[in-house]
Amino acid sequence: MRRLSWVVPAGRPDLFEPVTSTGLAPESYLGERVAGNLRRLLAVDLAPLLAGFRSRPGEHPWIGEHIGKWLDAAALTWAATGDDRLRAKLDEAVTVLIASQEDDGYLGTYAAGTRLGTHPDPRSDWDVWVHKYALVGLLSYYAHTGERRALDAARKAGDLLVATFQTGSQDIIAAGTHTGMAATSVLEPVVLLHRHTGDPRYLAFAEHIVAAWDQPNGPRVLSTLLDSGRVSEVGNGKAYEMLSNIVGLVELARISGDDRHFTAAVRAWHDVVAHHRYITGTASFGEHFHRPDELPDSTSVHMGETCVTVTWLHLTRQLFALTGECVFADEIERTLFNHLRAAQLPDGSGWSYYTPLDGYRDYGPGISCCVSSGPRGVATGAASVFAVAAERDELVVSLYQDAAATVELDGRAVRVTLASAVPFDGGAVLTLDLDRPATFSVRLRRPPWADGFHVDGAAEADGWFVLPTREWQGGERITVRFGLGAHTVAGTGWNASRVALGWGPLVLAYRADGPQPTAFDVFDGHDFGPVTRDPSAWRVDNRLAPGGQRTAVLAPFADLGADGGPTRVWLAHAPGGEDLSVLHGAIESRSSGSLGKGSVADYDPAAFAATDVGPAGEEQWFALDLDRPATFDRVVVAHGRSLVHGGWFDTSAGPPRIEARTGQGQWATIATVDGYPDTTAADNGGLRAGEVFEVVLAAPVTATGLRLIGTGSHGEYGPRVFVTCARLAAYRTVSP
């Protein structure tokens, strides 16, 4: 029940304080993952994470970030579980880290002469980033244990940063990659240092960092968000580092009371939700924010980086605490129940770096930024259930899970127990245990997916149901009535032609092995069976699936993919009467790459297939083969997606070709895609995502196969190339 007492009064105080000591039942949806997280934190070998501090330089430029992330995750998890084993491991890790600190406060993993980005060697530009996470870990440990030695070590490191970049002559923008955003993300722990100590030097340094954003070489974080509100225009668009900076801006808003700091952060958040956030609660692909409303979701585009997911969750939780608005609590639930859970192996032992909505997840137990970030996100799950109002006696319930906590209300210790079967069944019961009567109010979130939400005696206000202040007796129970069920989510922007299915807070998905099911008008009469944890509870028939009618078995997106199989969320949705390609049901192939990664024959214009990256001298292709001949006189192809490292056909030596497999089994050119723009290996010539090209043949062709073939591209990188394709189809428009 320890509540942090900040030294410095906040300029914009939090409305809600999360109850970090909440215990989740291990059999609950989030609790089982928190339990797995505890097992992993206990099992992690800390020696490799501390080796770069004990013996400098470290193994690679950002190796030092991992111990800080582990400390933060472990401190949060210890606060929720009270596990003595974890506390002992925490104490040991902090002891070793502090012992490695040099006399001047240095707490990184770089050799002398290459530190804090003051050396021209580009490999030295992650040192401030490393210090950021060392500070985050030490301050989290201090916040949850009260151990002063951690704060003292953090102050020494903070003093070195001040001396180097504010009172010294070094440029903090030049000290970090991604237009300086890696280095300036230290803003968050610098502000926390000020809140913990009251030392005005740290606040001055925080303001110095914000001012540096507008240097000619800076990312213009604050000014861009105030001017346009678009995250895609900030710096180089790198999502993880940018969101980390915006989290720091929220922390600064707490102290400064400056409306610009708060407004910029909120605008960024809403821009991500409106234009860059996937329905599962993550953001960005290729680790960057790109043009608004382009949300490709396959394995090949590297979407859903776990570091981004966790930082997005961190930002959302900060804004919820600051504002108390339900929209932020809704997003916390979305991320925790869907994308973050999907990125974690069920037993907690591993994490996926990227977690695509369409494709494969590659889980790893090793040392990587995402494997270290994931546990920090899961560790916030327990602290997302209950909160208390900062300025009044009020209990807040913002997430429905089996959970319990002891909170202080009206000067008394109140034991609150929440029982709920969400996300598989509706309703909840809150039980209050206290020795003597206490006076307080209770605030309960109404989830946007809830059906028929009702609490006796409560008044509804802005997404909350509030029981007014009154005297409560021990043993009283509050019954929360609501249902949940199936619903559809209509795609917009990139996904405008698609539809997804949900169940309560869950996004549903299906296994995408073999020919991929495609739903068009099936949702007019979809039938969901009895709701259980058995994935077979949800089924839909797909009338126009490649290969004929199929049944798609749906399950929570978060619970699929751990066995190495491909999953898919979005389904194509088009009016009835869709013309079928004469190659409907054909067997797909391509010059390289997994057939589980997208399809060129699924009638879904927002999905695409990609070849693997290969040598520039080899042509790349997509093909469809039938076991019978088909006659056609029109071919339709659609571009997939242009990425920073290629994805289009290079037309320097001619446009892509259309080939047919004749009766002799040989491929022969029957046309070229003459409408394709002039491109090079590095320039896509303005080719639009999903752009369609129709090729009318001079005469009908009868063939057993169709192939699109040409030279690949490498974009900003080289010399290896690849291509993408969203559609390959053939039609007969001339009567026989």
Image (spheres, rainbow, N blue to C red):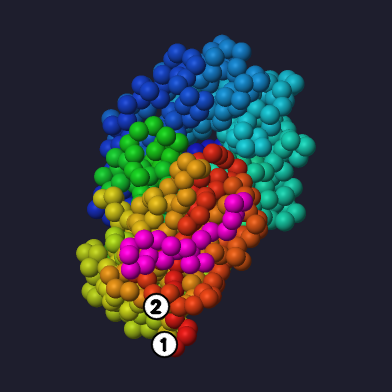
Q: Which residue position is annotated with label 2?
A: 631
- The percent position of residue 287, horizontal first and vertical second, equals 53, 46
Q: Quadrant of the C terminus?
A: bottom left
The amino acid marked with disc number 1 is: Pro
Q: Quadrant of the N terminus?
A: top left
Q: Depth check: give the residue in front, 702 or 567.
A: 702
Q: Depth check: give the residue in front, 727 or 339.
A: 727
The amino acid marked with disc number 2 is: Thr
Give the residue at the far front of this rendering: 664
Circle 2 — which element?
strand
- The percent position of residue 154, horizontal first and vertical second, equals 54, 24
Q: Image height check: is 261 above or below 432? A: above
Residue drawn where x is 28% and y is 50% of the image: 564
Q: Which mark is residue 621?
A: none
Q: Depth check: give the residue in front, 56 or 603.
A: 603
Q: Image height check: is 569 above or below 137? A: below
- Is 657 colored magenta in this rendering? yes
Q: Which mark is residue 736?
A: 1
Q: CA distance from mark 2 to mark 1?
A: 9 Å
Residue drawn where x is 39% and y is 32% of the image: 367
Q: Earlier in the sequence, mark 2 or mark 1?
A: 2
> Mark 1 Cα within 10 Å, few/some/many (few <14, many 20+)?
few
| Quadrant position of residue 334 | bottom left
- The percent position of residue 233, horizontal first and vertical second, equals 68, 51
* Callout 2 touching callout 1 (CB < 8 Å): yes
- Is 335 colored magenta in this rendering? no
> Which span is picked out in magenta?
651-671
